Amino acid sequence: MSQRLISACPLSRRALVAGSLTAAATLAGCSLGDQGAADDVVPAVSMDVATERPQVLDPGAADAAGLQVDFQVFDPLTEYDYELGEVVGRAASRFDVSDDARTFTFLLRDAVFSNGEQVTSESFKRAWERIVDPSSALNQHYGPSPHARRLVLVEGFSALAAGDTHSLTGLSCPDSRTLVVRLSAPYADFPILAAHPALAPVPQDAEDDVESFGRAPVGNGAYAVASEVQPKTPVIHLASDSGYILGAPQIEHVYLSIQDDSVDAYQAFSAGELDVSPCPMDDLAGAVSSLGSAPDGLVMGEDGHVVESTELACSLLQLNCGKAPFDDISLRRAASLAIDREAIADLYQGMAAPADGLLPPVACGYREASWIYAAYNLAAARDLMQPALDADDADERLAVSIIYLDEAGQQKVVETVAGMLEHVGFSCELEPLEQDDLDKRLASGDFTIARLDAVTDAPAAELFLGPWFDSGERGIENHGGYANDDVTALLDEARSTVDDAIRVERLQAADAHAGEDAPLIPLVWPRRAFAGVDDIQDLLIDPVGFLHLASARIDR
C-alpha cells in the first residue's frame, strides 16, 4: 500500500487511498489552489483498522467495542506493560502504595485534554464518581454503569451507589496533580485495576453535556475523535493529538472501520481495504503462512504480522462441591483427569489452547502444569472412580447434569465433555439454559456441573483466583460452595502484600492448593488472532484485545 494523503475536506476513507490528492480534493468539493500548493502538502501516515460497532463511547458506560476507541482516546492512571511484566504509570508519572496496601497516591503528569482543559486530580475524581453515583448525568442517560464494580473497594462506594451521598470518601485531591485513593480493605493489586479505560479522567463537559460527550468524547490520550460519531457512522476517524503529554504518535490518522464480524473484516483486509483485522479461525493457517506469526504473541512487526495469543480467560466446568457426587474430592479429581483437553481445543480449530490450570499463560504467576489433575489420565481417573462404581448407589450417585448457556458453539463442547465423563462411569444429562435461568440456577446452587468462563481484563492472578476460590464475600463466582481456609488465608495475605514477588508467591500457593482440591475443571484458554499488513511495525495487541496504536508505526 502506498502512503496516504490526508485532506482537510470530508470524504470517504477509500477515496483517499484510491485517488491522487488532486482527485480526492475534487471529489470532496474542496479547492487546493494551484499545483504548487499540492506539492507542499506533507503526506500523513494513516492506518485502517477493523472494529465492531460501539454502542457507547463515553468511557463510563462503554461496551467492549467502545472501550477499544476509548483505549486510544483516554489515558487512565496506569497501564500494564506486557513486555516488562509490570504496572507502570500512564497519566500518573508515578504512584506510591502504603504499607497496609490500602492507600495509593498517584502523582499526575502535567497533561491536558484534547480540548485544552487541564487534566487534574479532580478530573479523575469526577470520572470515578459519575460511574458510581446513580444521579450522575452519565447514569441518568445510559442507565447504571457496567464499570461501577471496578470501584467497589474504594471507601464510600456503598453509600454513593445507594444514593446516600454524591462523593467517594476514599478519593481525595490534596492538589491538582495528586490523587489519593483509600480502599476499604487491603488490595495491593489496585494499580492494575486503575489501568482500565473506564477509569480514565473526563473533563467537565462529560457531565454538563453527556449526550454530546458520548458522540465525541474528549480525552487525554494520544488520539482525539475527529468528528461526532452517529449511530450509523461507517468509519470512526481518530486524529493524533499534537499536545499529547507522551509525544504524538507516528500514525497520525486512524480510521476504525465498522465491520459486522471477523469474517467480513478479514475479507476487507484480504481485499486491501484494511491494514489490521481480526483473523477468523478458518483463515488463521493461511494468514500465518503468508504473513508470519509474531513469536511473542504480542507485537506485530518484522518477525511476524499475525498476533496469536491466549486471552485473559479460561473456559471451565464448575463443580458443585456441596452435593453428590462432587462433595467427594476423589470424584472431582477423577472427573478432571477424564477430560482430554487437546480434543476439546481441537473443536475450536486453533482458537483455543488446552488449559493446564485456571490461570492462562498471560496472567502474572502462571506456572506450567501447576494443576496436576488438569492432565489427561484415564487410568488414574478410573482408579479414583472405582470405589464409587462398586457402591450400591453408584447409578444414583454418579448421575450428573451439565447446565450451560444455550448459544452457538457450546453444545458440541458440552456433548464432548459428557462423553468423556461417561467413559469413566458418570452418566450425564445436558441442560441448555437461557442466561437468566442459568444465573438463577447458579445463585441457588441447583446444579452439579456448570459450563462457565472465567474472564478478566487485567493479568493479575488474584482476579482469577479470588472470585472462584475465596470462601468469603469476595468469592463472587464461587457458586459451587468450595471452601478451603488455607486458600482463603493465602488470598488475603496476597492482597495485603505490597512486595510484588512475595505477593505472586502467595497467589501461586493459593492456586496450587485449589488445584489439588479440583473444585473446577479447566478446559481451554480461548485464543484470538489479528492480522496486519507487512509494513506495520511495533503494534502491540494485548491479551484483552486492545490495539496499542500510539506506539505503532508504518514503514511507508
Image: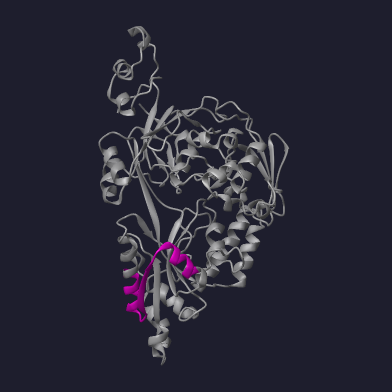
- Above or below 482: residue 551: above
Q: How many marks?
A: 0
Residue farthest to the bottom?
A: 392
Q: Nearer the viewer, residue 49 or 505?
A: 49
The stretch in magenta equals 416-442
Is residue 319 a member of the stretch shown in magenta?
no
Closer-to-camera residue (377/48): 48
Which part of the image, by quadrant, shows the N terminus? top left
Residue displayed at 45% across by 49% down: 543
Residue farthest along the right direction in this orientation: 174
Q: Point out residue 165 in the picture as x, y percentages from the top left corner.
A: 70, 49
Instruction: Please determine whether, in this image, residue 526 is positioned above or below residue 226.
Output: below
Q: Is residue 418 magenta?
A: yes
Which quadrant of the structure image shows residue 128? Answer: top right
504 sits to left or right of 520? right
Of the 4 image quadrants, the one containing the C terminus is top left
Whole-percent x, y for residue 329 in the image: 49, 78
Which is nearer the eye, 152 or 482?
152
Q: Where 387 falls versus 446 (above or below)? A: below
Query: Which colour scheme appears in the figure?
Result: one colour
Q: Quadrant of residue 77?
A: top right
Determine which quarter of the picture holds residue 16. Answer: top left
Q: Is residue 33 visible?
A: yes
Q: Position of residue 542 (x, y in %)?
A: 45, 45
Work out whether residue 2 can be spotted.
no
Q: Position of residue 221 (x, y in %)?
A: 53, 33
Left or right of 34, for residue 360:
right
Left or right: residue 531 compared with residue 151:
left
